[in-house]
Amino acid sequence: MKSPDKHRKIIRAATKVFAKKGFFNARISDIAKEAKVADGTIYLYFNNKADILLSVFEQEIGKLIDQVAGLLEKETDPQEKLRIFITNHLEEMKKNRYLAEVIHIELRQTSKLIREYRKNTFNEYLAIIAQIIKEGQDSGVFRQEFHPHVMRQIIFGSLDEISRCWHVGSDCSLTTDEMSGQMTALFQSGLLVQSV
């Protein structure tokens, strides 16, 4: 019988292995060793290595979607929504350095596997940013000339790069709040309708 705990344990182990070795260099045996399970146990839960990578994204990005959706649910101010999204993403990436690395590296791969994935759950996550921008434009707070889909790529790209600064040996000494404050201020100042 499959165990939800063991499934989570394998996902955590795979995230760490993919972050350290990359998807193409990682082996099922590496994941099994990190998870402290037999190689064969992996195949009780996953079809292959690609299935594991997609499960990492589905599970972890799914958690981010649920979490930020809950935080945004009662907020109506688009500026505050943008701050919440930025802060939540940075906090979660700071907590999970391996996930930050996997997102940064693997989502940039050109394999069909990743291209197909990007069209699905990951797109749902990015759509939250686009929705915030659109709400701000509809309410007259954010400038109309910026396309929400372009802005979501710019904002996520910046978040993705910044989220690695705590993990790759840089001399970044800013706290999550400081980093979030600077990013939020930068994007809001560019997006806000200028008073005449």
Image: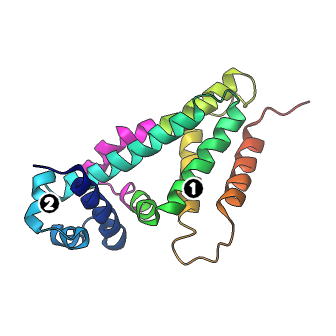
Q: Position of residue 110 (x, y in %)?
A: 32, 54
Q: Is residue 139 above or below residue 90?
A: above
Identify the disc placed on residue 42: 2
Image quadrant for the C terminus? top right
- Indicate whether residue 118 is drawn in magenta: yes
What residue type is disc 1 on? Glu
| Residue 149 visible from this viewpoint | no
The structure residue drawn at horizontal position 63% and vertical position 32%, both measured from the top left corner, is: 133
Up/down of 164 relative to 79, above or below: below
Q: Is residue 10 left or right of residue 182?
A: left
Left or right: where does residue 194 sit relative to residue 188? Answer: right
Residue topped by disc 1: 91
Q: On the rendered structure, is 69 left or right of 13?
A: right
In the rendered structure, which segment of residues is drawn in magenta?
105-124
Mark 2 burial class by Cα count in 10 Å: few <14, some 14-19, many 20+? many
The structure residue drawn at horizontal position 34% and vertical position 37%, both measured from the top left corner, is: 120
Instruction: Look at label 2 and name its amino acid.
Output: Ile
SS for dot 1: helix
Residue 177, image x and y in percent? 69, 57
Q: Report the predominant secondary structure element of the magenta stretch.
A: helix
The reply to whether residue 62 is in sight is: yes
58 vs 80: above or below: below
Viewer-proximal residue among 111 and 91: 91
Asked if residue 115 is among those painted magenta in the image, a careful observer would answer yes
Percent from the top left, x then y, of residue 45?
Answer: 15, 52
**Marks 1 and 2, Cα distance to the nearest angstrom?**
30 Å
Residue 143 occupies quadrant: top right
Mark 2 element type: helix
For residue 26, side relative to residue 48 (left or right): right
Q: How many marks?
A: 2
